[in-house]
Amino acid sequence: MSVTVPKASRLDDRVVVITGASSGVGRAAAHALSELGATVAVVGRNPARTRQVAAEVGGTAYIADFTDLSAVRGLAASLLDDLPRIHVLANNAGGTFRDRTLTRDGYDITFQSNHLAPFLLTNLLLPRLLETAGDSPAGTVRVIQTSSDGNRFGRVRLDALDNRTGLWAAGMRPYGTSKLENILFTRELAKRLRGTGVSTYAFHPGFVATNFGGGGPVIKAMQKVALSPAQGAEPLVRLAGATTVPAPSGNYFDRLTAPGKVNPQANDAELARGLWEASERLAGVAAGV
Ligand SMILES: NC(=O)c1ccc[n+]([C@@H]2O[C@H](COP(=O)([O-])OP(=O)(O)OC[C@H]3O[C@@H](n4cnc5c(N)ncnc54)[C@H](OP(=O)(O)O)[C@@H]3O)[C@@H](O)[C@H]2O)c1
């Protein structure tokens, strides 16, 4: 049976961290959530755009490039210094990369930007999310992943997480794989957070007219029929701000409805555990859950 996530409530006194908030879906979500009363930590890569959005929503700007895991650690340290409570972490930053390049840390750029960096950030912020859940209404502290319908054409191989092999070293195939990894991460995180009061969801925003895809002519033409950024942000706004989400933690929404269609690998619990353990090793973090 499918369920729909209800509209967001007022979010006064709630603190929301949004990555990828300098543009597109994240920027629109920052606007909507601040209009509902939330304090928004605006995380982006481009300093000018990030500061601009922070100024627009009356939030604080945080700059980090996810192709550098030390920058992610610095980001987490700043957020933990500044925010005594975090009610929602929205792991929204991500994109496609035309060429397979390696990050500063020596990993594939799609894998690190879209999966490994948010994995690390989440684990570094988890102690604060767990503390916040201790005195918040049950189920209102949440970790939300912006995944994609593209998860359906991904393929996760634990022996080739770095996309080093195969014809599809860059572009949409590794992108789909990274979005499938977002769902596997959500599934495993839900399992590890059971009973803690922190819940987690992933969602597909729809096809949205943003900077996604690098703004090439084909994408620009297709975007004429796309959703607006505000429409694309609606699932994130609701998953962050609804008083209750009518689906168990770990679910994947296709826009406002769960369960969304997933790659069969998304339901492989062993794969989810294997991805988590490999990510701990690659990110150099020992998860506390
Ligand atoms: N648009 C769609 O049709 C669509 C469909 C399905 C899923 N999604 C997902 O929606 C999310 C938001 O994308 P969007 O459509 O809003 O695209 P967008 O306008 O390009 O926004 C992407 C955001 O992610 C940030 N980002 C990208 N790579 C980063 C990196 N290496 N380090 C730190 N930040 C990085 C960007 O930062 P800067 O701008 O500061 O560089 C920007 O804030 C992504 O996860 C994307 O996969 C989008």
Image (cartoon, rainbow, N blue to C red):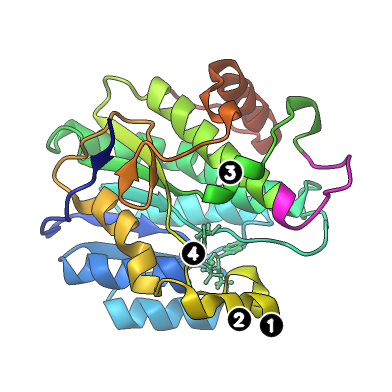
Q: Amino acid at mark 4?
A: Phe
Beta carbon of the mark 4 residue lies under 8 A of ligand 1: yes
Tell me what residue is drawn at x 46 percent, y 41 percent: 122
What number of labels is visible? 4
Determine whether, in the image, residue 73 is placed left or right of residue 129.
Answer: right
Q: Quadrant of ligand 1?
A: bottom right
- Residue lying at the far top of the rendered structure: 270
The residues bearing labels 2 and 3 have C-alpha atoms spaced at a distance of: 23 Å
Residue 68 seen from this side: yes
Beta carbon of the mark 2 residue lies under 8 A of ligand 1: no
Tag shown at residue 221:
2
Q: Quadrant of the N terminus?
A: top left
Q: Magenta region's main secondary structure?
A: loop
Residue contact between numbered discs 1 and 2, judged by CB atoms under 8 Å? yes
Helix, strand or loop at mark 1: helix
3 or 1: tag closer to the N-terminus: 3
Q: Nearer the viewer, residue 3 or 30?
A: 3
Residue contact between numbered discs 3 and 4, judged by CB atoms under 8 Å? no
The residues bearing labels 4 and 1 have C-alpha atoms spaced at a distance of: 16 Å
Start-end of magenta stretch:
162-173
Q: Residues within 10 Å of mark 1 (few under 14, many from 20)?
A: few
4 or 1: tag closer to the N-terminus: 4
4 or 2: tag closer to the N-terminus: 4
* Residue receiving disc 3: 151
| Residue 167 on the magenta segment | yes
Q: Quadrant of the C terminus?
A: top left
* Residue receiving disc 4: 207
